Amino acid sequence: MRKVVVVALASLVLATGCKGKPKLEGKITGYKEGSATVIIVHAKAVKGSKILVLGLAYKPDVDDVRESPALSIIDRLRSKGAHVRYHDPYVAELNFDEAHTDASGAPLHSVELTEEEIRTSDCIVIVTNHSQIDYQRITDLAPLVVDTRNALNGDMRKTSRARIIRL
């Protein structure tokens, strides 16, 4: 058993300001209050993982990334060795300032949300729940989805092929 993308989950919890125990659909094998460390069975290490972040804006259907938790999430994941890509229909390019430079500060560009992009990602993290994104398609194709915005309704979670972690 190895720490997952969920070492990243700890970063997500801290970066998004979530309090208390995360709601998880997967099997929890460890949880430590305060540090928000969660370990999931049969998962992959963050280092070297391909992580796709959905949505960068601070709220749905806008292009404003000021104070968006996505900036810290991406930076923390990159500093842990993850290969982070993002899709946002409103934000074509993301530039980092000195507040977000734990890892390489190189700009990122929004990727097309293709079937291959979804299938080949080790984890998809929903940071902003834009209305243009087909979340049913995401849950049908992705292996692991971390939903920080409750974008996935009950029916999607029940029929999902993906393991879903809700924060």
Image: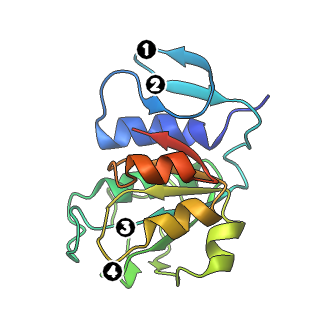
- According to the picture, the residue beneath numbered tag 4 turns out to be 91
Describe the colour scheme in one phrase: rainbow
Give the crowd class for mark 4: few <14, some 14-19, many >=20 residues within 10 Å.
Answer: some
- Horizontal side of 70 relative to 57 (left or right) equals right
Q: Residues within 10 Å of mark 2 (few under 14, many from 20)?
A: many
Q: How many residues crowd mark 3 within 10 Å: few (<14), some (14–19), many (20+)?
A: many
- Look at label 2 and name its amino acid: Ala
User: Which element carries disc 3, helix, strand or loop?
Assistant: loop
Mark 1 — residue? 33
Of the two numbered discs 4 and 1 on the same chain, state the one appearing first in sequence.
1
Residue that carries the numbered disc 3 in the rendered image: 55
Residue 36 disc label:
2
Q: Amino acid at mark 4?
A: Val
Residue in view at x 48 percent, y 71 percent: 86
| Left or right, residue 160 beside residue 119 | left
Q: Earlier in the sequence, mark 3 or mark 1?
A: 1
Query: Distance of mark 3 from mark 1, alpha carbons?
Result: 28 Å
Answer whether labels 2 and 1 touch (C-beta < 8 Å).
Answer: yes
**Which numbered circle lies on residue 76?**
none
- The picture places residue 91, in percent across and down from the top left corner, at 33, 80
Secondary structure of the residue carrying tag 4 is loop
Disc number lying in front (3 or 4): 3
Q: Quadrant of the N terminus?
A: top right
Measured Cα–Cα span from mark 2 to mark 1: 6 Å
